[in-house]
Amino acid sequence: MGIVTKKNLHAIWLFVFIFFLFSCASGVSSRQIAGDYYMLAKGYADQKNYKKSAEYYKKARRQGDINLAASYELARVYALGGMYSDARLVLEDLLKEEPDNGLVLSAYAYVTTMTGDFEKSLEVYRKLRKRNLLDSKTIKNYASLLFNSGNYKEALAEINEFPTPLSEDSDAMRIAVLSALELCLESKSPESGAEKDNLSVGAATTSLPSATPETQNTEVSDIEDFSPPSVEETIKQAESYLGIQGKEQDTMVLSRLMDLYFSMEMYREGTQTFEKIPADKRTQEQMVFVSKIYFAKMDDPQLGKGVLEQALNAGYRDKTDFIKAVENVDSNVLEEINNLFKKYIESDSVKKQEE
């Protein structure tokens, strides 16, 4: 919640006092009363007091004259306050009156995503797409949902219709990069070090649109005619995204790019990408996989031991599996690996005895 200063609070309550004093004394019209409630609600929304704002939008709705506008804003403040189920109910009532309203449909698609009803959300987004009613925010939300549903080609085709160059919107570019990486990895079906489960670019990247958005008639090409970028183009775009200030350590992009490099047996590029992943974000599976690469593919036992020790610190203890993967290395190196495992296994034993 935003900070409500004494000055702002005083201004709101002064408005409330004058409003009720005036309405009682002069018998103002219901339209004016509704308008005053609406402005009060907006004032509270500006202060991020969404519950109080919702109260006054509901009062404005009851006056009738501005019911549709007040209802939409009520849904919006519900969503801003994280009250998505309440927002959904309001929007469903609105859709009964205006089933083809693009603004309300966009908001409904967003809210159904946030309530976890992805099937309904996809249905609504596809309805918007068919009618060319997708604005930039809705395109990002739709593409994000498609990605999280595993529809990578459709997500990439959708974000490809973004109205501005992707280089000018890092959120849109991220969806494009991740979708392209997943398509490349699907085509290669690699044994990779990153977990593919629970990938997410954010169920919805943006909030509900404002009450007066500029929707655009974007002609979206048929998904069957869409050709994803090549592996080389995908790598170039991923590296370009990671070159954006603040995106250099995007764990998900780095992980999937690393997997793509390894699937192409580009071990140096893969390990270099791994090293860019923040240490506290690396999974045990990634560390084990990269350590095996250092030992078995790159003949770099020093780096291999360093990463293996990270994995051991993270709880990895499957010595049999590891030795089998690197059994062709020098016998002295194998002995060092055995000693590392022995050190941590003995440490575990001591800790158990102390307990």
Image (cartoon, rainbow, N blue to C red):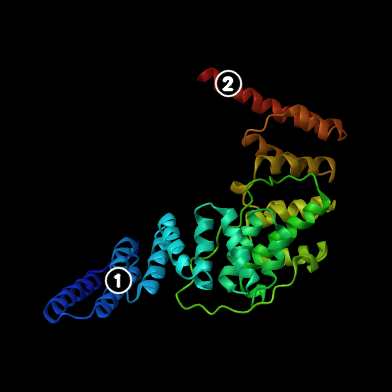
**What mark, if any, has residue 269 been given in the picture?**
none
Q: Give neighbour class at mark 2: few <14, some 14-19, many 20+ (Cα, 10 Å).
A: few
Q: Secondary structure at mark 2?
A: helix
Query: In this orientation, which residue lies closer to the viewer: 205 or 73?
Result: 73
**Residue 122 pos. (x, y %):** 61, 59
Q: Residue furthest top?
A: 353
Q: Give neighbour class at mark 1: few <14, some 14-19, many 20+ (Cα, 10 Å).
A: many
| Rendering quarter of residue 109 | bottom right
**What mark, if any, has residue 350 been given in the picture?**
2
Q: Secondary structure at mark 1?
A: helix
The residue to which callout 1 is attached is 60
| Rendering quarter of residue 229 | bottom right
What residue appears at the point 85 percent right and 32 percent down from the top-left corner?
Answer: 327
Query: Vertical placement of 10 versus 151: above or below?
Result: below
**Residue 287 pos. (x, y %):** 70, 42
Give, as a three-letter code, the residue at label 1: Ala
